[in-house]
């Protein structure tokens, strides 16, 4: 950040009085510009023994598969975000079953909340951010073509839980290793 979004004057990166982290501060209007992680919410849409995935029509990870999800907008709840993103990306209407996974991704300053949901019908179609939308059973999931680690982990947990006949709620962290080629996934105890 170079300039204050409030008054347009150049900002300085420093620790403001009473704080412990560097922030962009405007000396003219005294605005402190906080930069916080972004919230991403989405759905794990289910129909019988299958889940709905979208093939991305945008970067990052163009052409790879993902669960429908996106950034939370002001004035929305995470559930509203998940439902809106599923409608926008997959043209699918869903009923939320409950929070399934919450993953912190500190290396990109994001928090993902993915909700288990039921498709209300099979009337789905690719939205502007999707090349195609398709239902997959566990053995049909394109595991090596999933766009994001968080989606891989969520789907892995889902199929493990479905096999066990009971679903939990998971909270965890996905941390990129120093070589940036692999990830460490750690889960807290799941709640049932």
Image (cartoon, rainbow, N blue to C red):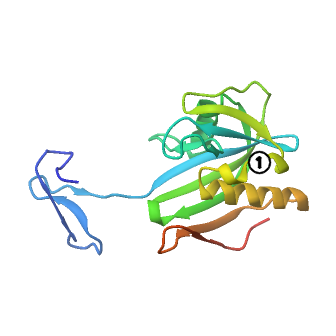
Residue 125: which quarter of the image? top right
Left or right: 41, with 26 as reference point: right
Residue 95: which quarter of the image? top right
Q: In which quarter of the image is the N terminus?
A: bottom left
At x 87%, y 44%, the residue is 49
The residue indicated by pointer 1 is 141
In the rendered view, tell whether residue 116 sits above or below residue 56.
below
At x 90%, y 62%, the residue is 164
At x 86%, y 56%, the residue is 162
x, y percent for residue 42: 62, 45
Q: 42 or 61, which lies in front?
A: 61
x, y percent for residue 180: 49, 68
Residue 55: which quarter of the image? top right
x, y percent for residue 123: 75, 24
In the rendered view, tell whether residue 23 sits above or below residue 55.
below
Element assignment for label 1: loop
Q: Quadrant of the C terminus?
A: bottom right
At x 67%, y 44%, the residue is 43
Left or right: 10, with 116 as reference point: left
Left or right: 2, with 117 as reference point: left
């Amino acid at each position: 950040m170079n300039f204050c979004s409030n008054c347009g004057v150049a900002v300085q990166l420093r620790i403001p009085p009473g704080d412990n982290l560097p922030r962009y501060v405007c000396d003219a209007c005294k605005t402190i510009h906080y930069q916080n992680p972004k919230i991403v919410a989405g759905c794990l849409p289910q129909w019988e023994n299958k889940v709905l995935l979208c093939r991305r029509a945008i970067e990052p990870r163009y052409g790879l598969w993902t669960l429908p999800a996106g950034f939370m907008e002001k004035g929305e709840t995470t559930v509203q975000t998940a439902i809106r993103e599923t409608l926008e990306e997959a043209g699918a209407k869903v009923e939320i079953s409950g929070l399934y996974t919450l993953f912190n991704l500190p290396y990109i300053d994001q928090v993902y909340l993915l909700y288990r949901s039921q498709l209300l019908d099979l009337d789905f179609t690719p939205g502007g951010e999707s090349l195609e939308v398709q239902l997959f059973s566990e053995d049909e999931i394109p595991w090596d073509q999933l766009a994001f680690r968080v989606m891989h982990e969520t789907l892995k947990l889902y199929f493990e839980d479905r096999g066990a006949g009971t679903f939990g709620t998971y909270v965890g962290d996905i941390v990129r290793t120093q070589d940036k080629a692999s990830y460490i996934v750690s889960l807290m105890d799941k709640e049932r």
